[in-house]
């Protein structure tokens, strides 16, 4: 009697995020950057074009975070391509924070010396019953002021406290002094979305090249 031949188990698929050089944003030209980051908790790669048209291709494994980053891209006109894999079986913390880190690093690289940029940007975003104000200085001096409160600990399956972690990581690695202030609002979805849209609109202004000083660093120090 022949012995049964044991079939080899299929090889596990790689859980490594695509390397940064494999990710692209649409078109050519513009101020572009790509970054990849791999830890024991997450594998994330992203590419951006500051001079894009707001095209996005984003997959983090967290539906609501994808939606917010799509809003960021669309309203800032920054093209964003991002792939993330993380330990979502534990919670969403690492993937949320590390996506902010990687996008912040992309922003830092794409801005370069920051010569020619307008530097400051702000926006006041109404969203139904909600009003949120965002102001930023692309000063290369990271700081976050977060005046946002939520009435519930979760939004769907996502902890609302994680949104501050994303903004903190993005400001820190992107070199932004960032103030986010929700003046009022009842719907937690509207509150979060207005924060991301406000950031987008403020970034759009701050990162634009000022035609009156295309090569000058916007600082009396001569450097940012």
Image (cartoon, grey):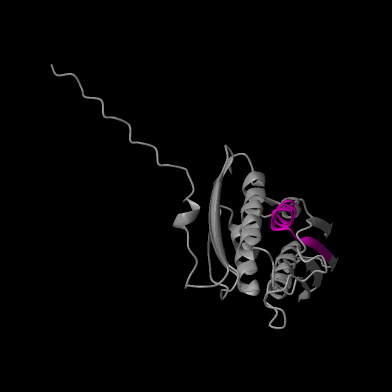
Residue 157 appearing in the image = no
**8 displayed left or right of 140:** left
Query: Would you say residue 201 sits in the magenta stretch?
Result: no
Percent of width and height locating residue 47 = 54, 60
Q: Of residues 102 and 126, which is closer to you in this image?
A: 102
Q: In terms of image quadrants, where is residue 76?
A: bottom right
Q: Of residues 223 and 195, which is closer to you in this image?
A: 223
Query: Residue at (47%, 43%) from the top-left corner?
Result: 15
Residue 166 appearing in the image = yes
Percent of width and height locating residue 162 = 72, 51
Q: In terms of image quadrants, where is residue 39?
A: top right
Task: Name the outermost residue toward the left.
Answer: 1
Percent of width and height locating residue 124 = 80, 75
Q: Quadrant of the C terminus?
A: bottom right
Q: In terms of image quadrants, where is residue 202?
A: bottom right
Task: Name the outermost residue toward the top.
Answer: 1
Above or below — where is 92 with respect to 189?
above
Q: Quadrant of the N terminus?
A: top left
Q: Of residues 113 and 162, which is closer to you in this image?
A: 113
What's drawn in magenta, residue-wise?
Answer: 165-181
Task: Name the outermost residue toward the front.
Answer: 222
**50 displayed left or right of 153:** left
Above or below — where is 45 with respect to 1?
below
Query: Would you say residue 171 sits in the magenta stretch?
Result: yes
Query: Residue at (50%, 54%) from the top-left corner?
Result: 20
Q: Of residues 192 and 80, which is closer to you in this image?
A: 80
Percent of width and height locating residue 25 = 50, 66
């Amino acid at each position: 009697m022949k012995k049964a031949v044991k079939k080899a188990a299929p090889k596990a698929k790689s859980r490594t995020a695509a390397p940064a050089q494999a990710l692209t944003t649409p078109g050519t030209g513009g101020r572009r950057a790509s970054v990849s980051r791999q830890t024991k908790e997450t594998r994330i790669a992203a590419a951006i074009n500051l001079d894009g048209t707001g095209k996005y291709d984003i997959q983090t494994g967290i539906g609501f975070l994808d939606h917010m980053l799509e809003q960021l891209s669309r309203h800032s006109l920054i093209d964003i391509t991002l792939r993330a894999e993380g330990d979502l079986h534990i919670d969403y913390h690492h993937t949320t924070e590390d996506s902010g880190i990687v996008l912040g690093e992309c922003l830092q690289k794409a801005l370069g010396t920051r010569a020619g940029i307008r530097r400051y940007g702000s926006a006041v975003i109404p969203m139904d019953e909600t009003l949120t104000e965002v102001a930023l200085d692309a000063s290369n001096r990271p700081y976050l002021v977060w005046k946002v409160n939520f009435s519930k600990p979760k939004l769907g399956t996502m902890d609302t406290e994680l949104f501050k972690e994303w903004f903190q990581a993005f400001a820190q690695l992107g070199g932004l002094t960032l103030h986010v202030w929700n003046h009022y609002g009842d719907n937690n979805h509207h509150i979060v979305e207005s924060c991301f849209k406000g950031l987008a609109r403020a970034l759009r202004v701050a990162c634009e090249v000022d035609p009156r000083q295309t090569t000058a660093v916007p600082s009396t120090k001569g450097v940012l």
